Image (cartoon, coloured by chain):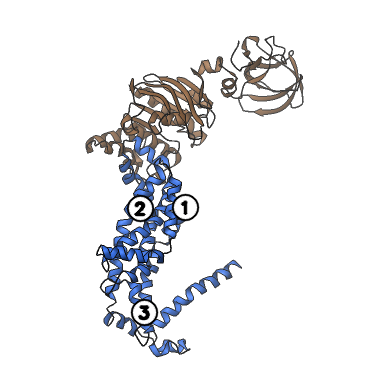
Amino acid sequence: MSTIAVESVERIYSGRHAAVAGIDLDVAHAELLVLVGPSGCGKSTLLRLIAGLDAPTAGRILLDSIDVTNMPPQQRDLAMVFQTYALYPHMTVRENLAYSLRVRRFDRAAIDARVRTAADALDLAMLLDRRPSQLSGGQRQRVALGRALVREPKAFLLDEPLSNLDPSLRTQARAEILRLQRRLEATMIYVTHDQEEALTLGHRVAVMREGRLEQLATPMELYERPANTFVARFIGSPAMNLLPAAALGIPAAPDTMAGIRPHDAVIGEDGVRATVDVLEPRGHDTVVHVRLECAGSPEFVITVTEKAPPSGALVRVSWRPDRVHLFGADGRRSG
Amino acid sequence: MSRTLAAILIALLLGPIAWMLAASVLPENQIFSGAPVQGLLHASFEHYRALFDERGFLLPIRNSLIVAGLTTIIALPCATLCAYALARLPMRGKGVFLALLLAVSMFPQISVVAPLFLVLRATGLIDTYPGLVLPYVTFTMPLAVWLLTGFFRQLPRDLEDAAMVDGASRLRVIRDVVLPVAAPGLASTAILMFLYCWNEFLFALSFTFGPEHQTVPVAIALFRGRYQIAWGEVLAGAAVATLPVVIVVLAFQRRIVAGLTSGAMKG
């Protein structure tokens, strides 16, 4: 397995729209790096640039310290899993798995052996003679993964591989990918728009917005110390409350925004007065939306594990002062 | 309401064909008698026998098959590569090129008959198979390229990307992935090209001199003798010329419709 480096890579489309506007990234050997961001943030474009399916307008891409910026995708020896799976519809599962090996002129015995290994690893042995149209969504997803696996490539690029699966299957498939990544010590770049998926999968997570890198850090660090208001709101569910510090009575420089995660706030005897608005029970806890009694009566969200107060109740909301994130007027973390 | 309209439309379209089929089995003196139903009691395949025995109608059929077949075999691969490039490869002035292509296929044929005749005579290709195949290729290509470009554009791009990441060269991607997936579109395009050549009249009339290379439409048109027209045989010939078209279209009906409308094929 190998390392990938992206150096000030830029991709500007003809309409002067910068899909990727200068990104620096390093992926270590056996690391699983997740690219996450809202749709249109350039994460898929960046992945296609690394795969060689698109060419950057500036910057370099290094694979094992070798400049591959101008190398066609065929020679990069990377495997990619597509959101649509992109299984060859006219080939059986066996042919789908074997295709890349056939193109590389492996001999028959080697192809058979590798296809069998991949099929066993992904529980596809019974499906080898079926066509993609005869498979369920989960099975198709596994074939797409298997097609990348047989290659034993330098690195894996996964473009939202689980977004077309049912939620129940998704957790299972996620665990499968994690197991494979550990076992093969694979270098992986994983693109998703789902922040929860990013936090659970990534060794490190790169949060992107409008073609730029907002923060690159471990999941814990992203959650505990978001670098700016965008990351603060994007990571974590329900999203962090973000209000003017002055409105909450938190001492800070003017125009400072204060961020408080829903589970860092409590409903109790003292604190800011509020009225309970809506309740969203989630089983293990309840998401309580309240209106604070201060200028503009802003909405504030609190997760409560005990019994939640009824809608319309007058309550008081408080939080641990050491759990307050402060952001300056420019949106950057200030404390 | 719409059913009634459909029925009327079908009657209008099929009426002449029914008349053609009926008249082709009527004795010559019954065709214009005004009582075709009674005439049908005397129905016979005499005209068809005469068509093949006396007129040697097998020869124009053979000519038509050769000319239409060769045109399709030559033009389809060329059109396929051209259309793929237009659909997928980065290229300047694609839109202009496609517009010109469409413009070319809209040219009134009669406007190029004279210049083409001179070219073919100068190159010694008048009254030969290539003398028909070459103009047909140039006239069917634009339409085929236009159809196939639209068709290729609708194919999921991920499939080709996946094959390239898998290590296949561009041409190999076309061979292994694009062509099999695009098979319905290619088939319907091939059929349309073949039918164009099968039905074409003006070039076939202008660029052939004798029965040796005449195609079916020309042969039928020249049935009219100096003093009378053998309507029975003309209509029998027309029926024979129509039959393969009808069979092909019915056999591939679904594919043609799918090819002309959607073009996409779901895995």
Q: Residue at coordinates 38% horizontally, 47% vertically from top-left?
A: B84
A162 relative position to B66: left or right: right
Looking at the image, can residue A279 be seen? yes
Q: Secondary structure at mark 3?
A: helix
Residue at 45 percent across and 40 percent down: it is A137
Q: Position of residue B160 (x, y in %)?
A: 38, 41
Residue type at tag 1: Ser
Question: Looking at the image, which is closer to me, A313 or A69?
Answer: A69
Chain shaded blue: B
Relative side of A56 to B209, left or right: right
Q: Are marks 3 and 1 on the same chain?
A: yes
> Chain in brown?
A
- In the rendered view, would you say A193 is above or below B6? above
Which residue shows up at 61% across the image and 68% down it?
A: B1
Residue to which mark 2 is pinned: B79
In three-dimensional space, the C-alpha distance between marks 2 and 1, rounded to whole angstroms, equals 19 Å
Q: Are marks 3 and 2 in contact (CB under 8 Å)?
A: no
Image coords of residue A258 (percent x, y): 65, 15
- Marker disc for residue B262: 1
